[in-house]
Image (spheres, rainbow, N blue to C red):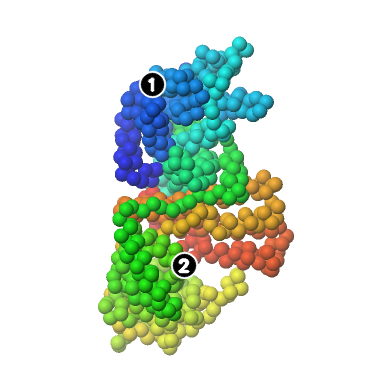
Amino acid sequence: MGLALSDDHLALAEACARFVAERCPMSVTREALEAPTAVRPPWWSAMIDLGWMGLAVSEDSGGSGYGVAELAIVLDALGHGCVAGPFLPTVAAAIALDRWSTDAERGTSMLKRLLDGSCTAGIGLRPGGPILGGQDAEVFIFPVAGDSGWTWVAADRSELVVSPLESFDATRRMATIAIPDDVEFSLDDLLDCDVGAPVGLFTLLAASESIGIGRWATDTAASYAKDRVQFGRPIGQFQGVKHRCADMVVRTEATTALVWDAARGYDRRDAGWQVALDAACADGPASTFRTTQDCIQVLGGIGYTWEHDAHLYLKRAAATAHFVPAARRWRAGMVSLVRGGSTRSVSIELPPEAEAIRERVGAFVSSLVARPKAEWNDVIADSGYLVPHWPKPYGLDASPIEQLVIDEAFSDASIRRRHLQVAAWALPTIIGHGTDAQQSRWVGPSLRGELMWCQMFSEPNAGSDLASLTTAGTKVDGGWSITGQKVWTSMAQWAQWAICLARTDPEAPKHEGIGCFMIDMSSPGIELRPLRELTGMEMFNEVFLTDVFVPDDCLVGGPTEGWECARTTLANERVSMGKGASFGPGVTSLFELAETRECFDDPLIVDELGSLLVTSHAAAMLGVRSTLRALSGAQPGSEASVRKLLGVEHEQHIQEVGLRLLGDDATLVEGAAAAWTSGFLGNRALSIAGGTSEIQRNVIAERLLGLPKDP
């Protein structure tokens, strides 16, 4: 998925994609690659006419007056086409002149030439460093070092000595500059800005372009993996290839979410915008460089050829990632900001129609708190507010906006709704496939907390491959006889009911011939054997079923419709948006530990903490984008699948770093170490339960990229 979410941005993205497809074919990029010197691309005038150069330039300066968020969408499209030419440095220079020029007349003159396309610009990011786009530029933005630090200069080519450099990415040529002895820059030649501002601006724009590069690399690798046959099957069926492609998706989607937030915050200067900027700059160019390397690897020999376009994207990504400051600099910046109290808000501004909903929900909450607290749970359950996204009468058929307003109202009133635990999985199946009598029997009492459930799906030889289950359901007079073994059954020792899958037709294909049964856990023939986890606790159980009788009225759906029941999810899915900062309690606790252990003088630890901040913010922004899609009525994007995988491994990483900070105290299970050692052990389950991370990668590769399923 690209950056665009709103209707206006989607229209802009479509226009950009059409322009690149029609006016910027790869043949033009290859001509630039082979040319002896930098050349102005043939599409330059057409792009100027579209006004893209001035998208983020103020109207007073001759621009369109939009912002970096809109410009990022253009750069995303240009990156996807690996478009040659100096658009990136020129548009960055235009913004710099518009916002920071100290001489209105000089700055306006330079800016006018950039906006009308009569000249291009080159940009340098460190004193004496190479100038991107400098070979044929007429306007130069670069820093010079002085006794009091860096000073940013805007200069014309006539004031400099420009020498071409052999460029790694020959589609966007580099140069070096020298300042003649007889040239002295005055205050009128300077940019009035913080020393890091132009670097941050340029790196954000480069990160925007990198999204398109990453999307191309991911799509190209996946497309090849679908078609390339080795050992008698497409290489996309091999898990190693599949997982590499899935990781490419995860990186690209994380970068997209980070850049989207940084770009929208850059012009607003809203709370925590600098945190968002550092996160995007830390992730974008470096992450995309890795993704282009993975693309070459998936393509194999064909990707190593000059004829294939992959090397053009690889060189673009490599040159960009090494032209901008290293990712560790931005990660260190994030750590410093967070230590200083900066956070990034992840709240969503709801549309005007939310006000009427707030009044209605507010009235319910007010009436609730007026009751005795002992009645709250039943009132919430019976009113539909416990699971408002469920259909009536058990929920409210709540729209995404209603769900967010309800969450907000309950949170503001400090009312915590009961967690349904396993019932949250069992009840939707009963609602979607059960009879009215079955719904009356189980749904209401479970919502009120009168019934506790467990789920008997997994078996010793049917975990991730659940459809291979062998527990047998045999038809008998008045019901079914269930025999088999289940494992990893959480809370079975406390549950009154279980949702259980059993094979009712052993001759049918494995996804067919399965029934879905509701089993009374007090039935004869059920034996529980608690499984002691590596934490020392006993939450899981083995369950042995021997001729357990299940009445006909406890079969949900038809005798062979169990697999469909197991896959049931509500059509109107839950929409959740947490309030507050994007850095969860795990990261906050880790920073507190680092403070007490005086670890912030170690640059390796600072870099590790910065990496966790970037990932935490990426996961939060993926959630925001997913919520915004739901609010707009759009089809779900890839954010949810990516966020699940990213979040699980992120939480485990937090605990691992916590142990590292503890040092030899991590050998203990008492004192300061207790929470971290138990958290580390408990979090091992995150990448196993509910589908392993390996299976999740398969899901991403197969459902999002269309790679072939395992045979």
Q: Position of residue 44 (x, y in %)?
A: 37, 23
| Mark 1 to mark 2 CA distance (whole Å) | 58 Å
Q: Where is residue 220 shown, x and y percent of the image?
A: 40, 41
Indicate the quadrant where residue 177 lies: top right
Question: Secondary structure beneath disc 1?
Answer: loop
Residue at horizontal 66 percent and vertical 67 percent from the top: 674
Q: Is residue 529 left or right of residue 364?
A: right
Element marked by disc 2: loop
The circle drawn on residue 414 is 2
Along the viewing direction, whichever of 90 and 350 lies nearer the viewer:
350
Q: Position of residue 86 (x, y in %)?
A: 45, 25
Nearer-the-camera pick, 290 or 343: 343
Q: Residue at x 39, y 43 (%)?
A: 2
In this picture, residue 143 sits left or right of residue 395: right
* Residue 364 seen in the current view: yes
Residue 691 against residue 522 in the figure, above or below:
above
Residue 568 falls in image quadrant: bottom left
- Taking depth in this image into account, of 336 and 656 the one nearest to the observer is 336
Residue drawn where x is 59% and y is 28% of the image: 126
Question: Considering only vertical position in the picture, is 554 above or below 76?
Answer: below
Under mark 1, the amino acid is Gly
Residue 72 in view (yes/no): no
Vertical placement of residue 345 versus 546, above or below: above
Which residue is found at the position 60% from the left and 70% from the top?
535
Camera-side residue: 542 or 172? 172
Residue corresponding to mark 1: 117
Q: In the picture shown, does residue 25 fall above or below 559?
A: above
